[in-house]
Amino acid sequence: MKEKRELKQLKKTPPVAKAKLEVLFLLSQKYTVPIPIPTPTPGDILADIKILQKTSSLHPSIKTMAVAKSALKSLISYVLLQSSNSNISLLSILSCTALSLESDFATTTYLLLEKRRNLLLLPASPPPSPDESAALVRSLIISHRLAEANLIFSSDLSPTHPLHALSTLPTFVSHYIEANDLPQAKFYLLQMKDFASSSTSSNSIPWLKLIQTFSKCYNTNNNANTNNNANNNPVYDVLSTMAHFPKVNSNEIYEQVANALVRRVVFVTGAVSMDTLPPADRGEACFIGRSNVGKSSLVNMVLNRKALAYTSKRPGKTQQFNYFSVNDKLDKKKEVKFGDQFPNQAPDSDSFYIVDLPGFGYAKVPEKQRLDWENFMRQFFTSRKTLKVVFHLIDSRHGLVSEDERIMKLCQELLPPSVKYVIVLTKADKNEKRTGELGKAKASVVDAVRHAMRENCVIDRSPLVLTSAETKLGRDEMWKHLRLAAEN
């Protein structure tokens, strides 16, 4: 009965699949005999390995894989027994092939790696190919053989082949994220900075995958931690690492960054005095600038929201300190809107406030109200202990006006050294006619801003960031400073 069933299954096998099975069967037979005739060279064996890989991957059925494993076992046994027909390249490639079927080749892979190490110790042994060593390291990581992967990484790749070493580090990171070992994942992520100087492009690094996996791990840990003692969001570490590499111009990546760092945003209150501010229980980042400078549009862009902060064609619409809570309680919106209480919920560990300050300049408000705003701002800057960063927005088309110089002077006088003061040039997309190039600011505008920064003694403490809410320019720089509030 069993033979009839097998015969029936074989008849149902498509002709192409039959041919592939015959190829694998012949390979298995070729290396089963003690000494194949003619004796295969290392090149012949490598060609047979490629045939085996290609054939089994094209038709990965249970039957095909069984025959492929049989052929691979015969081939490995032959290579392990024959010292003259082995070289480092052959052993590296054969090890990678065996590691793809780890459950069946754990012992034989160890023997292949041991033979490879012994060959490398010979005086006349040529150096291993960095491409093959990198592939072997990645295969070992995927197979959870970290000690062997680290050994080959240190001996073959680092520091002699920085680009190949760099290509393996994301695999280390991904492995430890999947194992929920964030400290080790961060360790290998930070190691990537050591090889950044040798990289001319960021395209080969899977930034998107790293952001997604770190974000998923953080969310899992954060949701499971009812005491709100979860670690800070590791996506900031990815951003920090990215800053050491050539510029990454990908909307998809930075939208993923914003979604990973901003999971919930709720308007909390519009404060008009120190008494009406929310509790100082987390970091705060405030945005200040004259009217029509593009504050609300920039906040919406950075947080990847379409209509979070109110935008208007009428300058001076923002007439209070608008507080937006980022990553607060899951039901914070119900608390604010209906007054419900959720005592068992807590903000995420990376929760912070975005504060949209009133627009100064030609806002159509009485002089008394403008003076009240300024007095409020003075008190806020000097006594708000949770304030971590102030973004001063200046229109890159027009440069400094008297109100900008006034704000800069106030920030220099009032902000304590612990508060980061960042100058942000907005609307860079509007400068094409002025500069002849999209996303640039006129040299005269930049020079004037830097001169004012020197005059007000903030040049050494204040970075200058060029942004555009339309083209998303400057998102990475903005998040680098927003991190100060989120990791309070």
Image (cartoon, rainbow, N blue to C red):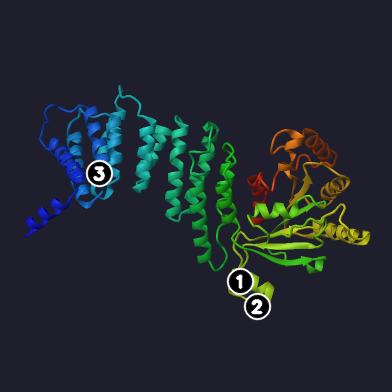
Mark before the other along the chain sequence, 1 or 2: 1
Q: Residue furthest top?
A: 124
- Residue at image mark 1: 331
Can you say whether 181 is above or below 442 in the image?
below
Can you say whether 446 is above or below 486 in the image?
above
Nearest the viewer among 465 and 463 is 465
Residue type, mark 1 in image? Asp
* Residue found 51% across the figure and 41% down from its top: 191
Q: Is residue 277 visible?
A: no
Nearest the viewer among 464 and 488 is 464
Q: Nearer the viewer, mark 3 or mark 1?
A: 3
- Residue at image mark 3: 56
- Residue at image mark 2: 340
Are the residues at dot 1 and dot 2 in contact (C-beta closer than 8 Å)? yes
Q: CA distance from mark 3 to mark 2?
A: 60 Å
Instruction: Please state, as top left, top right, bottom left or bottom right, where the C terminus lies in the image.
Output: bottom right
Q: Where does residue 431 sit, x and y in percent of width and height? A: 74, 39
Dot 1, how many residues are within 10 Å of its Cα: few (below 14), some (14-19), or many (20+)?
some
Are the residues at dot 3 and dot 1 in contact (C-beta closer than 8 Å)? no
Residue type, mark 2 in image? Asp
Instruction: Please state, as top left, top right, bottom left or bottom right, where the N terminus lies in the image.
Output: bottom left
Residue type, mark 3 in image? Ser
Residue 108: image tag: none
Q: Secondary structure at mark 1?
A: loop
* Residue found 23% across the figure and 51% down from its top: 61
* Residue found 57% across the figure and 41% down from its top: 248
Mark before the other along the chain sequence, 3 or 2: 3
Q: Is residue 138 left or right of residue 241?
A: left
